[in-house]
């Protein structure tokens, strides 16, 4: 089912995602998400589920998550072998099956992943600033730190009147204003993203200047496939680099991690072929002895899955949260996930551990 909602953390833009509800013959209900983002992509992913993938799991044992994942991956070999729309569909079904599995076994998901490796997660405010004036943005960010967040990650090239990513002078004035506002010890990361088009020379120059203000890492300074540019930037600056949130398959993550260029891998359980795919990527992360963080910037379902996955691995570096209350976090479920004194605590309820308000689902459903 497609969801349409206003996102206050993205300058009140309209955003879209896809949810799946699976009910067993014993009455257990599992929920999952595929973060397809655009309305046409949501409809396409839903069509794959309705027209093909549903038949693969109907009447089967929902606890056989690995088997169902393998069957779905094999089914989409022609149109989804490298990810794309098929990965959103698989992610949603797989997440819902894991939710059912945890509920059937009366265990929170992190216990099914091997148990806690971390007792709590570093809470990061992941934001898109919206004002042209640097001080307004800096004051807003300082407010989140005052609420308890331990770090902030700022997306460049987003909606609103902020013009981050376009000129050197503007960007440096912003970074300086934020660092002055939050102090020297608070974590500060920059996510360059798709709409900002840096060349290598500009990226090197900006990264060196960012280092003077204690930027912890740079995320996606180039398009993910521009690996030669990542290599040149890393060689010239030594800066920690993050990428991965736009990958979908275990094979794609394997290729990325094997380059040795990425220090922090972004993984989204609503995109990376679900929780099962995510767990396979975590094995690659552990083997490479690098860090990861979850790209959990959609609904409370994906946030919950991300908390369970992150708690179960010693390689999680931060837990991203939207700092402003939003409908898909605070209306969709009765028990939204929030930071407490700078930390995100384990979720102890069975399955995903969040209780969906089906009236909210009906309210925001568009297809």
Image (cartoon, rainbow, N blue to C red):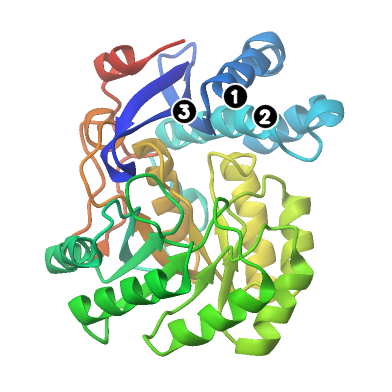
Kindly identify the residue that appears in the image at 43 percent across and 41 percent down.
302
Does residue 26 lie above or below 234 as drawn?
A: above
Instruction: Identify the residue at horizontal 62%, vertical 27% (top origin).
Output: 89
- Of the numbered discs 1 and 3, the one sitting upstream in the chain is 3
Measure how far apart labels 1 and 3 are at the Cα level.
9 Å
In this picture, residue 362 sits left or right of residue 310: left
Say if 29 sits above or below 87 in the image: above
Q: With respect to residue 207, does 32 lie above or below?
A: above
Q: Is residue 123 above or below residue 20?
A: below
Given this view, does label 2 or label 1 mark the residue nearer the observer?
A: 1
Question: Would you say 1 lies left or right of 141 here?
Answer: right
Q: Residues within 10 Å of mark 3 (few under 14, many from 20)?
A: many
Residue placed most toward the observer, 345 or 178? 178
How far is mark 2 from mark 1, CA to CA? Answer: 7 Å
Residue holding disc 3? 17
Of 161 and 70, the residue lying toward us: 161
The image quarter containing residue 190 is bottom left
Return the disc, 2 or 1, that comes first in the chain's sequence: 1
Circles 2 and 1, Cβ within 8 Å, touching? The answer is: yes
Report if the CB atoms under discs 1 and 3 are less than 8 Å apart: no
The residue indicated by pointer 2 is: 85
Tell me what residue is drawn at x 59 percent, y 34 percent.
91
- Res 121 visible: no
- Residue 112 locus on image (x, y percent): 50, 49
Left of 334 or right of it: where is 35?
Answer: right
Q: Judge by depth and name the residue closer to the eye, 114 or 314.
A: 314
- Neighbour tally class for label 1: few under 14, some 14-19, many 20 plus, Cα within 10 Å: many
Q: Nearer the viewer, residue 22 or 203?
A: 203
Give the x, y percent position of residue 258: 78, 70
Residue 185 falls in image quadrant = bottom left
Mark 1 lies on residue: 41
């Amino acid at each position: 089912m497609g969801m349409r909602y206003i996102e206050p953390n993205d300058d009140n833009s309209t955003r879209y995602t896809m949810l799946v509800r699976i009910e067993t013959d014993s009455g257990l209900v599992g929920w999952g998400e595929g973060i397809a983002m655009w309305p046409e992509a949501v409809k396409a992913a839903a069509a794959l589920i309705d027209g093909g993938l549903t038949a693969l799991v109907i009447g089967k044992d929902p606890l056989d998550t690995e088997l169902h994942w393998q069957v779905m991956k094999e089914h989409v070999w022609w149109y989804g072998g490298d990810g794309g729309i098929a990965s959103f569909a698989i992610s949603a079904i797989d997440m819902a099956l894991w939710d059912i599995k945890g509920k059937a076994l009366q265990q929170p998901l992190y216990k099914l992943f091997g148990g806690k490796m971390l007792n709590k997660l570093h809470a990061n405010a992941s934001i898109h600033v919206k004002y042209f004036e640097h001080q307004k943005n800096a004051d807003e960010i300082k407010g989140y730190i005052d609420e308890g967040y331990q770090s902030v990650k700022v997306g460049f090239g987003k909606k609103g009147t902020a013009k981050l990513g376009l000129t050197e002078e503007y960007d440096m004035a912003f970074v300086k204003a934020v660092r002055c506002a939050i102090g020297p010890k608070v974590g500060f990361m920059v996510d360059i993203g798709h709409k900002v088009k840096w060349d290598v020379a500009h990226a090197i120059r900006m990264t060196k200047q960012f280092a003077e203000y204690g930027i912890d890492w740079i995320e996606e300074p180039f398009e993910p496939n521009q690996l030669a540019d990542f290599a040149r930037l890393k060689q010239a600056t030594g800066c920690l680099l993050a990428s991965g949130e736009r990958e979908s398959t275990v094979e794609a993550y394997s290729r990325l991690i094997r380059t040795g260029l990425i220090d922090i891998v972004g993984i989204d359980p609503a995109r990376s072929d679900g929780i099962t795919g995510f767990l396979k990527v975590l094995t690659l992360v552990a083997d490479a002895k690098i860090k990861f963080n979850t790209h959990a910037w959609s609904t409370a379902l994906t946030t919950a899955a991300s908390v369970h996955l992150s708690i179960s691995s010693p390689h999680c570096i931060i837990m991203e949260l939207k700092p402003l209350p939003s409908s898909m976090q605070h209306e969709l479920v009765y028990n939204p996930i929030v930071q407490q004194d700078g930390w995100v605590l384990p979720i102890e309820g069975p399955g995903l551990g969040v209780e969906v308000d089906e009236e909210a689902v009906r309210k925001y459903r568009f297809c």
